[in-house]
Image (spheres, rainbow, N blue to C red):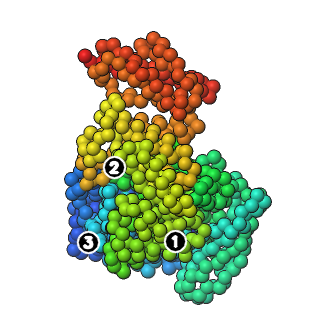
Amino acid sequence: MRRLVLALVTLLMCGFFVPAATAAPPGHDRTETVLATGWKFHLGDVPGAAEPEFDDSSWAPVSLPHTWNAADGADGGGNYRRDVGWYRTRLAVDGGAARRVFLQFDGANLVTDVYVGGRHAGRHEGGYSGFRFDITGLVPAGGFVPVAVAVDNRKNADVAPLDGDFTLFGGLYRDVRLVVTDPVHVDALDFGGPGVAVRQKALTATAAELEATTRVTNDTPVTRRIPVRTVVRDRARRVVAVAATSVTVAPGGTVPVTSALRVRDPHRWNGVRDPYLYSVTAEVGGDAVSVPLGLRTFAVDPARGFLLNGVPYPLHGVNTQLPSRPGRGTAVPDAAIDADYALIAELGANAVRMAHYQHSPREYDLADRLGLVVWTEVPLVGFATDSAAFTANAETQAHELVRQNTDHPSVAMWGLGNEQYVSSPAANAVLAAAQAVFRADDPDRLTTYAHCCLSDSDALAGHADLTGYNRYYGWYLPDAANLGKWADGLHAADPQRRISVSEYGAGASVRQHEQHPVPPVPGGHWHPEEYQAEVAEASWRAIETRPYLWGSFVWVMFDFASDGRNEGDRPGINDKGLVTDDRVTRKDAFYWYQANWSDRPVLHITSARDTVRTTATTDVKVYAGTAPVSLSVDGVPLGTRVPGDHIAVWPGVALHPGPNVVRVTSFEDGRWHTDTVTWTRQP
């Protein structure tokens, strides 16, 4: 017992054993500590909650990430609670005046005010980009300081998005971190970005010419001559390029320093085929920040489509909303995000449109490593407020999107927004303002916009370099086969316009089935899984034969919360996903795209979940690769088919009363593959 007491005393003296979130003892390097535990929460505005001595003993203990809309944000009715939520914790920071201390929020929806020791540390307006506040002057050299955070997800006329066909989950739904640096450091306040931006100036087979700009900050009271070293390493961590210089920075000043680097015999980042990554580390005094580097070129040709490293590379991808789970909303751990991207890779997609706002840092990292080409956008969704404040907010969120993600090689295009419903002067002005930010902050990448609901040539579609069209033929518009006719007409009328299909698809319930389905009512309660698959088949056939479409993005990869919806088999869910919101069930359409897009051997009997049949015969349809597929029912062989267009069909297969075991087999990639279902015929 005495030994245990001594150990506890030692921990207390060292500052490690605390009842609240704490930071590791500082060294000479930058430290980052995730502040996941030790928080208290109260839903509803509370006068005085920012004060240091406020009594929060009755508040609920929570861990981050957290949202208060985990349940009501996905149960339908459009009445999920949009309010102010308060979070409080006690923070221990060692190091005193010799260190700089920042609070970093990876995402808090929608408007956030932070108080440290009762004093206002900062305000952030926007629910999806990260942000940091310098709290050095607000924390004591030792001991604890109370931190209070007010997060407000009520609709705000000056903050984008105003609303959307998705639930705006309130709260600290991403990680919060304590960042501690030396007083001479890489700038931490550049719109939440890393303070390091690498620009590829030229790329050939023999060399890559780079410019790395590091923002150098001197938070000491005297002018300093500060050494700056930039190092490029390959995937094996070998140094392949170095630049060294120094810069004089006045007290409290920040100076950008640009260094030229050359990487010989560059290994290109080549999408899903070879997503090769380098890294760039900027060393400023005792501080260091690393960012990813992928060497590649992007271009879009109006006739040949998307070009990666000079070669046509048609983008076949999916749209994603924020990673989420039932009962947790968007407050999910990293493992859930990793699982989502593992499913995207399994599908065989080579691109992701991260709709309709900036996504989590981990998603961009995963896209880099998996080779997924990314379209990412600011949250200009539906409507725009005609005010200078709203435009300024959109501009700030555009700056944040670029500064925080410019080093990700996966990011190919910045999105100006999605589906402005009215082509008003205000909407056009705010899109033009976002375009100007993107052009100024990143002149190398292309911009795009997801257009819908108005004329194809409306002014809204003319601000970005590229245009995406949300076209739901077979769902909101008649006949999925019309997608190709529409695209041909637009291309013929304006052959220099570079166009994509930014959204297409249909709803599907894995609990509802109909053989040879008729088109359902989109807003109705009957969304048979088979109909989504038929729309997917017709849509992809139209897309893959038209190389001028530089990309296509299925809406959507996963079912997701949209609390205002009441359709399909349950309210509060947009059921157009290829995978259910719990990530348990891959719908039939998932396997259709996988058969067309991936290198995996695919063998999938469609309508497997339609387990109770009332007809004496049924068609058996299988999504497959290219190898011959054999069918048997209850062990009786019924022939072999060579899949045409990745589909094999046996029409009019007899079902006897009771259970029928249906099995298909194929031999591909050196091994046998089997899929089996049981359909029970009831008279």
Residue type pointed to by label 3? Ala
Residue 117 figure quarter: bottom left
Instruction: Identify the image quadrant of residue 89.
Output: bottom left
Kindly check if marks 1 and 3 are in contact, taking CB atoms under 8 A apart as contact. Answer: no
Quarter placement of the C terminus: top left
State how far apart marks 2 and 3 are (Cα).
48 Å
- Residue at x 24%, y 42% (from the top left corner): 525
Distance between mark 1 and mark 3 Cα atoms: 39 Å
Q: What SS does tag 1 mark? A: helix
In the displayed structure, 606 sits above or below 358; it is above
Instruction: Give residue 268's position: percent from left, percent from top.
Output: 68, 55
Res 162 visible: yes
Residue at 45%, 75% (x, y): give it.
433
Image: 52 above or below 19: below
Number of residues whose C-alpha sits closer than 10 Å to that of mark 1, classed few (under 14), some (14–19) or many (20 or more): many
- Percent of width and height locating residue 390: 36, 75
Cα separation, mark 2 vs mark 1, equals 32 Å
Determine if residue 23 is in view: no
Read off the residue under disc 1: 438
Q: Which residue is mark 3?
A: 49
Where residue 411 sits, quadrant-wise, is bottom right
- Tell me the SS state at disc 3: loop
Which badge, 1 or 3, is on the more N-terminal residue? Answer: 3
Give the residue pinned by disc 2.
476
